[in-house]
């Protein structure tokens, strides 16, 4: 029986909780962190939420629905420090910690050597208790076989949630939930789905594709896979490990043109793959990482059926992963591409071996041309900048 080894940790009302830890008199009160003048609420206590305050909400509206709201101005520095301490505690449990935002992240406890699910649970409960004891912060935990399920589980019983989804039960766990619980299905899409009779995740699995197509477009299969709890993204640590090849770029101005970002990311594939070939390696997993203007970030990863040292198999994957990150419809300030799952030896069995051999030889020629200082760099046609009309 496989163990649930992926943990999603999500701090409860993080900014407010940090303030409450500093000023215990705020505990149990209707309070919120936010700017007063033309500001928005960035975090509200559960007492304030019960009063109708949510995030992000204009402060003025918050004060209207909850006139006795205690408004706490942002305190520079303290949230970042609390976040760092929280993730440091996570790293006492496992080295594989992926920080997704200031108060949310994934842990992979796979390398910890736990023998039973009960051992995993005890360790994660211990971490949850330690974060409360040492930092005064409550966090919700979801434990599952993959990130998607763990993330949904952690958000299910907030605050102080602790939900374990045994591996193999993902689909049954998700089935009764409303479709809006799936990441990427926002309130507008959810409303359209509900109007089409698709209320729960089970409905999404069972609905004929023809009914979903007009709403989800090309995302139908991806959403259905999510609905069935399928997700094989690896937990990615921030630490640069030697067993990966990566590149990232921070943009001078935030980019909101998808094709532009796609071209940059594909360009990274073109730059990383020659280094991989030069080292005599092959790679299997690609992770695309993006950062939004508010510094939150997201990673999307996918593994090929077999490792390769060619660019082509990863082009469609770049687009797919970027599209997943693009669902937020926010401009990007950073994009990064990373290859992991590095393998030493050539794969034993390769489908389309001949085509790949031709491509490899062509890639070798391109690498040779590109390594010459004098000649112009050779770029796959798909990577050329479009001429302005
Ligand atoms: Mg949170």
Image (tube, rainbow, N blue to C red):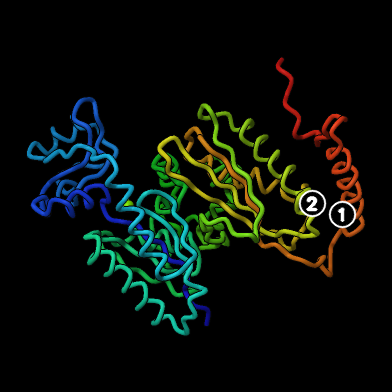
Say which residue label 2 marks.
Answer: 310
Q: Is residue 46 visible?
A: yes
Identify the residue at image location x=74%, y=42%.
Answer: 270
Distance between the alpha carbons at the discs numbered 2 and 1? 8 Å
Closer to us: 385 or 78: 78
Give the residue at mark 1.
Answer: 356
| Furthest residue in direction top, as rendered | 389
Residue 322 appears in the figure: no
Marks 2,1: beta carbons within 8 A: yes
Name the quadrant containing residue 188: top left
Q: Is residue 278 left or right of residue 140?
A: right
Q: Nearer the viewer, mark 2 or mark 1?
A: 2
| For residue 126, above or below residue 317 | below
Depth check: give the residue in front, 165 or 299.
299
Query: What is the x, y in percent for residue 217?
Result: 58, 41
Residue at 84% across, 40% down: 371
* Closest to the observer, 366 or 176: 366
Q: Residues within 10 Å of mark 1 (few under 14, many from 20)?
A: some
Q: Compare marks 2 and 1 and give the one earlier in the sequence.
A: 2
Residue 255 figure quarter = top right
The residue at 11%/41% (across/down) is 70
- For the C terminus, give its image quadrant: top right
């Amino acid at each position: 029986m496989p163990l649930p080894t992926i943990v999603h940790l999500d701090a409860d009302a993080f900014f407010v909780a940090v303030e409450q830890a500093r000023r215990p008199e705020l505990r149990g009160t209707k309070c919120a962190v936010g700017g007063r003048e033309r500001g928005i609420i960035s975090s509200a206590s559960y007492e304030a939420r019960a009063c109708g305050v949510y995030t992000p909400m204009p402060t003025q509206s918050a004060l209207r629905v909850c006139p006795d709201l205690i408004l706490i101005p942002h305190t520079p520095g303290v949230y970042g420090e609390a976040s760092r301490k929280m993730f440091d505690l996570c790293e006492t449990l496992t080295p594989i910690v992926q920080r997704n935002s200031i108060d949310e992240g994934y842990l992979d406890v796979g390398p910890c050597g736990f023998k039973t699910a009960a051992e995993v649970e005890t360790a994660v409960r211990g971490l949850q208790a330690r974060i409360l004891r040492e930092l005064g912060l409550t966090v919700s935990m979801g434990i599952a076989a993959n990130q998607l399920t763990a993330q949904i589980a952690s958000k299910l019983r907030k605050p102080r949630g602790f939900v374990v989804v045994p591996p193999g039960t993902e689909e049954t766990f998700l089935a009764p939930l409303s479709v809006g619980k799936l990441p990427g299905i926002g309130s507008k899409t959810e409303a359209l789905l509900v109007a089409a009779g698709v209320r729960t995740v089970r409905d999404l699995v069972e609905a004929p594709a023809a009914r979903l197509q007009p709403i989800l477009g090309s995302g139908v299969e991806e959403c259905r896979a999510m609905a069935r709890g399928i997700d094989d993204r690896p937990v990615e640590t921030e630490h640069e490990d030697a067993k990966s090849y990566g590149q990232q770029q921070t943009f001078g101005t935030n980019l909101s043109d998808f094709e532009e970002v796609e071209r940059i990311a594909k360009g990274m594939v073109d730059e990383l793959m020659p280094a991989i070939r030069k080292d005599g390696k092959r790679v299997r997993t690609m992770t695309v990482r993006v950062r939004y203007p508010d510094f939150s970030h997201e990673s999307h990863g996918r593994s090929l059926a077999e490792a390769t040292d060619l660019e082509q198999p990863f082009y469609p994957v770049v687009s797919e992963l970027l599209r997943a990150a693009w669902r937020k419809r926010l401009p990007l300030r950073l994009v990064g591409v990373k290859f992991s799952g590095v393998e030493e030896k050539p794969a034993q069995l390769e489908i389309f071996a001949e085509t790949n051999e031709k491509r490899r030889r062509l890639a070798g020629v391109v690498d040779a041309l590109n390594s010459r200082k004098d000649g112009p760099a050779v770029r796959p046609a798909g990577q050329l900048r479009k001429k302005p009309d």
